[in-house]
């Protein structure tokens, strides 16, 4: 039996197609492992049948895991984590007006929102947050396109970061998680 090693990023369909072709060419079974599932291709197998077998095994494993106490415990933990994050993010958004005029406090609040809000299950009013930032004088893409030394100024860099965050909020998206590291660097600036 020959062994085939699928490449990183290769689809199960492509792996089955290659293994089936190898089996037909060499008149010898070809085995490979894809996402932890062993697949054996024979010369008389159709690639679609191999894909279907792999998908059945994958679904059986998923169903077994989802019926396990470990999965239920993980789901319960996830639900609590989401509830906690939703609470923190929404409280922070609701209280942003209290800190919006103090750039240091605003950046700490935005960091919390970006860090906890980077999850598909976290729901908060992004348009409202954007409107509050704009009312305070911030603009989307604020202070972009400046020479590198311009951003050595803490106020300029802070305005730039908020402008980048606004870009995402205006599109109804959570800010990109890289904003956390940008804010962390900003907090260390003098």
Image (cartoon, rainbow, N blue to C red):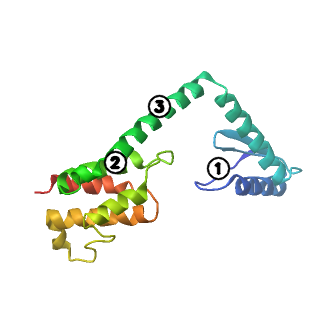
Q: Residues within 10 Å of mark 3 (few under 14, many from 20)?
A: few
Residue 80 is labelled as 3
Q: Is residue 63 left or right of residue 112?
A: right
Residue 12: % across, % down = 70, 52
Q: Is residue 97 left or right of residue 114?
A: left
Residue 171: % across, % down = 46, 65
Front residue (pair 71, 13): 71
Instruction: State which mark lies toward you, 2 or 3.
Output: 2
Residue sitting at 28 percent across and 63 percent down?
A: 161
Instruction: State which mark lies toward you, 1 or 3.
Output: 3
Q: Residues within 10 Å of mark 2 (few under 14, many from 20)?
A: some
Q: Earlier in the sequence, mark 2 or mark 1?
A: 1
Residue at far top of view: 69
Rendered view: 135 above or below 174: below
Element on which disc 2 rests: helix
Front residue (pair 93, 141): 93
Residue sitting at 17 percent across and 55 percent down?
A: 102
Q: Earlier in the sequence, mark 1 or mark 3?
A: 1
Rendered view: 2 above or below 132: above
Residue 52: % across, % down = 80, 46
Q: Which residue is mark 2?
A: 94
Residue at far right of view: 44
Q: Residues within 10 Å of mark 1 (few under 14, many from 20)?
A: few
Instruction: State which mark lies toward you, 2 or 1.
Output: 2
Image quarter where the C terminus lies is: bottom left
Q: Which residue is mark 1?
A: 5
Residue sitting at 32 percent across and 46 percent down?
A: 92
Measure the C-alpha gap from mark 2 to mark 3: 21 Å
Residue sitting at 36 percent across and 57 percent down?
A: 129
């Amino acid at each position: 039996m020959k062994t085939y090693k699928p490449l990183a990023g290769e689809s199960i369909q492509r792996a089955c197609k290659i293994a089936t072709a190898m089996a037909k060419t060499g008149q010898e079974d070809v085995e490979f492992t894809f996402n932890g599932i062993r697949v054996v291709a024979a010369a008389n197998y159709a690639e679609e049948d191999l894909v279907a077998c792999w998908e059945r095994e994958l679904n059986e494993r998923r169903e077994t895991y989802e019926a396990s106490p470990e999965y239920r415990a993980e789901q319960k933990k996830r639900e609590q984590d989401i509830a906690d994050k939703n609470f923190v993010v929404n409280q922070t958004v609701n209280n942003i007006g209290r800190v919006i005029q103090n750039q240091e406090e605003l950046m700490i609040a935005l960091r919390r929102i970006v860090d906890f809000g980077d999850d598909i299950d976290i729901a908060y009013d992004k348009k409202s947050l954007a409107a509050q930032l704009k009312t305070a004088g911030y603009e989307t893409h604020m202070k972009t396109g400046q020479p590198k030394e311009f951003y050595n100024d803490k106020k300029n860099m802070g305005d730039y970061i908020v402008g980048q965050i606004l870009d995402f909020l205006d599109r109804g998206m959570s800010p990109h998680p890289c904003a956390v590291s940008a804010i962390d660097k900003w907090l260390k600036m003098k």
